[in-house]
């Protein structure tokens, strides 16, 4: 085998390794917040940027706070405080819901222990 | 190395690379949205992201249609039917409602009436015909007056596509059944779309199809005290339903009233924190889980047998886990209850 042959083989093997890593390797756990209203995704946000958002819905304003890598439903319409009661959302799969405002606030990622929760 | 061999080797490696990049890796495509008055979570295991997105859209549309047809208190096909039944009319039943009502009546009988989809007036009396019930609880007199009218699913006469009620106190409310029926329909729909591996979770109750690759779907069952009580791996085409006292409730004058009403007393059922069942038919599972919650620690095993449920667990209000042996064999407990009692059905 000539040096050129070896070079071609090394380059090709490198290309295979790169393709595997890019397209087949498991995705890393995410640190992203997704906000859905009804059946439409409103936005995706990084959990690393502290901020407070106002999301308008049919029942009023929901305040979503992002701080220190976590998010919470800080205030929302609804007499029982179900959305606020979800507390800080940190782990992939953590979710807060405001049915009056038709909002789902969820942390995305691949690290969930269960595929789905039954309740 | 000869030039021809070298070229073949190079093209072979490039070909494998191209194959790897051309196919998408099979993955779980998860989507959450609000429909049917609750949070829907759809997990589809597929290498075709576009097909998964199209299936999700189809599910949304289908759920909206079902919601509009079966809603118990907002104007719907069901509320129209209730209004006409209350007036004593005989009416041609809509084909969308007929199979639901026939099955609901059969399941009500099998549960000794503990699953009672004809108690809409009682649910309205308790304020559970609203998105966020706030109380107050009804008076004893109001409840007694309604129960004295003895609304029963036997009052519903279904004959040759026509329906009639012999009791004006009967008001249909499919809240403890329609979700299961919907999940059966939706899983069939997904299969027709070529989706074989998925979970449709509607507000906590779910149907699982196939598996995500070589492992089964892993489901966590909520602990009424928060967290996860147990994990379970599903088999193909299994529905898991749980009814708990934490789902819909209101607090009034320091007392908590949940939404699972006992048709015998007219009050929220006592003695049970949560019940979970697994069954291939989601509609049956939905009806059964309500009936077993009402049956409580004393009668749940008899009712489970009558309704053909083999995989059942019930957590009572003293933190004792009552579980059938087949269910016990599949559960992985995440925390130890005060006691575990295993029953051989």
Image: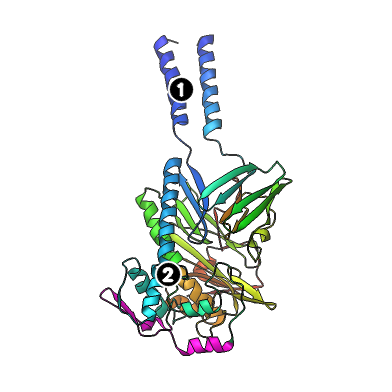
Please provide percent x and percent y for residue B125: 53, 79
Q: Does residue B42 sit above or below B105 in this rendering?
A: above
Mark 2 chain = B
Q: Is residue B83 visible?
A: yes
Q: Which residue corresponds to the image point at 42% horizontal and 54% vertical from the top-left?
A: B61
Residues in magenta, as a range: B140-169
Return the residue nearer the eye: B217 or A118. Answer: A118
Please provide percent x and percent y for residue B268: 57, 79
Return the residue nearer the eye: A11 or B189. Answer: B189
Q: Does residue A90 sit above or below B116 in this rendering?
A: above
Considering only order in the chain, which callout, 1 or 2, is on the residue closer to the N terminus?
1
Q: Which residue corresponds to the image point at 44% horizontal and 87% vertical from the top-left?
A: B150
Q: Name the residue under label 2.
A: B284
Task: Choose top left, top right, bottom left or bottom right for residue B135.
Answer: bottom right
Return the residue nearer the eye: A22 or B268. Answer: B268
Helix, strand or loop for disc 1: helix
Which disc, if any, is residue B13?
1
Task: Choose top left, top right, bottom left or bottom right for residue B225.
Answer: bottom right
Answer whether residue B145 is magenta in the image: yes
Q: How many marks?
A: 2
Helix, strand or loop for disc 2: helix
**How far apart in space, not on screen, are marks 2 and 1 (Cα)?**
54 Å
Q: Is residue A113 visible?
A: no
């Amino acid at each position: 085998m000539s040096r050129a042959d070896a070079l071609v083989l090394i380059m090709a093997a490198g290309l295979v390794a790169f393709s595997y890593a890019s397209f087949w390797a498991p995705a890393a756990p995410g640190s992203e917040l997704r906000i859905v209203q009804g059946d439409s995704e409103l936005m995706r946000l990084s959990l690393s940027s502290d901020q407070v958002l106002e999301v308008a819905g049919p029942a009023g304003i929901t305040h979503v706070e992002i701080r220190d890598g976590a998010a919470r439903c800080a205030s929302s319409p609804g007499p029982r405080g179900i959305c606020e009661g979800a507390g800080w959302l940190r782990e992939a799969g953590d979710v807060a819901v405001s049915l009056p405002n038709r909002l789902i606030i969820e942390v995305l990622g691949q690290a969930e222990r269960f595929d789905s929760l039954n309740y | 190395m000869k030039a021809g061999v070298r070229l073949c080797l190079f093209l072979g490696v490039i070909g494998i690379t191209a194959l790897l990049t051309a196919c998408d890796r099979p993955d779980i495509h998860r989507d959450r949205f609000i429909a049917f008055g609750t949070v829907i979570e759809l997990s589809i295991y597929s290498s075709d992201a576009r097909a998964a997105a199209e299936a999700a859209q189809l599910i949304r549309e289908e759920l909206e249609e079902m919601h509009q047809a079966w809603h118990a208190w907002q104007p719907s096909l069901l509320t129209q039917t209730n209004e006409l039944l209350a007036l004593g009319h005989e009416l041609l039943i809509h084909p969308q409602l007929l199979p639901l009502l026939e099955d609901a009546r059969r399941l009500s009988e099998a549960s000794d009436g503990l699953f009672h989809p004809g108690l809409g007036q009682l649910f309205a009396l308790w304020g559970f015909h609203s998105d966020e019930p706030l109380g107050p609880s009804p008076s004893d007199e109001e409840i007694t007056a309604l129960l004295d009218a003895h609304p029963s699913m036997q009052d519903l006469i279904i004959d040759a596509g026509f329906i009639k009620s012999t009791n004006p106190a009967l008001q249909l409310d499919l809240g403890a059944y329609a979700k299961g029926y919907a999940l059966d329909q939706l899983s069939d729909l997904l299969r027709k779309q070529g989706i074989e591996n998925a979970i449709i979770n509607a507000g906590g109750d779910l149907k699982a199809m196939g598996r995500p690759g070589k492992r089964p779907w892993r489901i966590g069952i909520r602990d009424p005290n928060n967290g996860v009580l147990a994990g379970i791996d599903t088999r193909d085409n299994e529905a898991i339903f749980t009814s708990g006292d934490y789902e819909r409730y209101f607090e009034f004058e320091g007392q908590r009233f949940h939404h699972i009403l006992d048709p015998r007393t007219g009050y929220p059922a006592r003695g049970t924190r949560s019940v979970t069942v697994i069954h291939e038919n989601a509609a049956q599972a939905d009806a059964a889980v309500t009936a077993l919650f009402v049956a409580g620690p004393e009668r749940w095993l008899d009712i489970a047998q009558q309704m053909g449920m083999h995989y059942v667990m019930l957590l009572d209000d003293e933190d004792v886990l009552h579980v059938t042996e087949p269910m016990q064999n599949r559960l992985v407990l995440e925390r130890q209850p005060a006691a575990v009692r295993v029953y051989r059905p």
